[in-house]
Image (cartoon, rainbow, N blue to C red):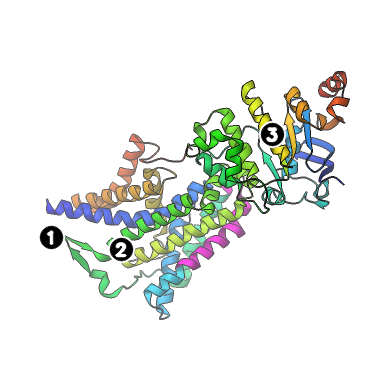
Amino acid sequence: MAMLETHDLTAFYGDFQALFGITFALEQGETVAIIGANGAGKSTFLKAVAGLLPRPAAAVRFDGRDIGALPAYEIVKLGIALVPEGRRLFSSLSVEENLLVGAYGRRTGGPWDLAAVYRLFPVLRERHHAPSTSLSGGQQQMVAIGRSLMSNPRVLLCDELSLGLAPIVIRDIYAALADIKQRGTAVVLVEQDLVHAMAVADRAYCFQEGRVSLAGRPQDLSRDAIHAAYFGL
Amino acid sequence: MLGWIDTLLQGILLGGLYSLYATGLSVIFGIMRLVNLAHGDLIVLGAFLILAATSAGVPLVVACVVVVPLMFAVGYALQSVLLNRALGRNILPPLLITFGLSIIVQNGLLETFSADTRRLDVGHLQSASLPIGGGIAIGVMPLIGLLAAVAVILLLNALFYRTALGRAFRATSDDVEIAQLMGINNRSIYALTMGISLAVCALAAFFLGTRANFDPSIGPARLLYAFEAVIIGGLGSLWGTLAGGIVVGLAQTIGAHIDPEWQILSGHVAFLIVLVIRPRGLFPRAVD
């Protein structure tokens, strides 16, 4: 049995249905990439798992327990943390305060605390007093990742980590991701950047118009198959 | 000249009372973006609760110590039972609820306590004053009121800026969706916020009731002074709110010094002047 599973997960924005029965599994310590075009439902999927969108109670299971009825602030306490798209740092809080807020929902021990996050991203220690709005995009992404790690999650959901960042910064972020993975945290990566996502993923799902159009290990997926699943051609 | 110095001092002391009115309003606006139209009436409710306790033989200070946590509980319940149900992108439903609440509280007080004017009796402290030379004296109760306003702001700032719970308050204010991803239950944060606001109202009620007569109808005017103090000070800053209260208090006493009929009007004029010169207030902190 997988650690985190969704079964026939649906999600709506008002009357608009964004997910049509997503079935997904994540094993302990695994890294899974979710790829797909804009509007395929990748971010919606992460939000539904994290509890930010209403979803069927039995559609999401964690450690064999139905968690679909729980609100977002309970989900994070179980060990599932979301790094939101666009960073979304708390603008009136300093860098360190942003990280500390991340520990608010911590219910379990684990490898991550302030010192560990500063070891992962040393530049944040230097800027710990700075207003979070004064950081560069890459540094903000580091704070967003560190903030989510502070809850000591067993699953880290990452939404578009590379969005709007310079290639050299993306390389640093993905290097950090390898460290995070090494500590035993399972990672779900939603990415439009295929190359990076496929390089770190153990498995990948491709979403298309709210459905899974392809799933498998990156090395088993041919370029043409991905292309077809991505664009629906 | 001495008359003017006296007027300025009295204005600052009155401003202390107004900032006590305003602090609770500033807190709920800062964290929930909610304007509580029943704020003034809830202050008057606090005054009547203290009055009811003293009428039952409870010493005034004890009554105050009891009513502050009681009003905290009222605020907590009000938010979790009523206002949290109206949360959403639209700010009108909670606003309308507080408008209705204002009418209910006013009429409930009228029904229970009648329209008679009342006063809280502090005995000899009522008229006690400290001479500071030149024939000018400062009233002890107004001075305690100003010090209480400062103490409340120091306490709230310590809560908001030095504790984990305070970080959760500010995070919720910044981005409520992401705050929930951090394990923060925004509804319980809102309930605590309203509780804190009404606890400060109870303290304000004590100084309102010992300074002047009150009756069930005076709430809306207190709301107006409080609102003006918050806007003059700038949203999101409690020290700004204190400054705003003092501006309104000063304007009123200066107006009254020129002509007693100008007292209330000059407070509102000062508010309009600040709005024209600095639309975001004197010490804005919040971005929106």
Q: For the residues tagged 3 and 1, is the chain the same?
A: no
> Which image quarter: residue B67?
bottom left
Of marks 3 and 1, the one in the foreground = 3
Name the residue carrying label 3. A177
Q: Secondary structure at mark 3?
A: helix
| Residue B144: numbered disc | 2
Indicate the chain on which mark 3 is placed.
A
Q: In the displayed orientation, state which residue is furthest to the bottom.
A: B57
> Which image quarter: residue A161?
top right
Indicate the chain on which mark 2 is placed.
B
| Residue B133: numbered disc | 1
Could you say where residue A80 lies in the image, as x and y percent from the top left?
A: 72, 45
Q: Main secondary structure of the magenta part?
A: helix
Mark-to-mark CA distance, 3 and 1? 70 Å
For residue B104, above or below residue B181: below
A216 or B273: nearer the viewer = A216
At label 1, the amino acid type is: Gly
Mark-to-mark CA distance, 3 and 2? 57 Å
- Left or right of residue A31: residue A133: left
Mark-to-mark CA distance, 1 and 2? 19 Å
Label 3 crowd bin: few (<14), some (14–19), many (20+), radius 10 Å: some
What range is drawn magenta here? Answer: B68-93
In the rendered image, the quadrant that contains the C terminus of chain A is: top right
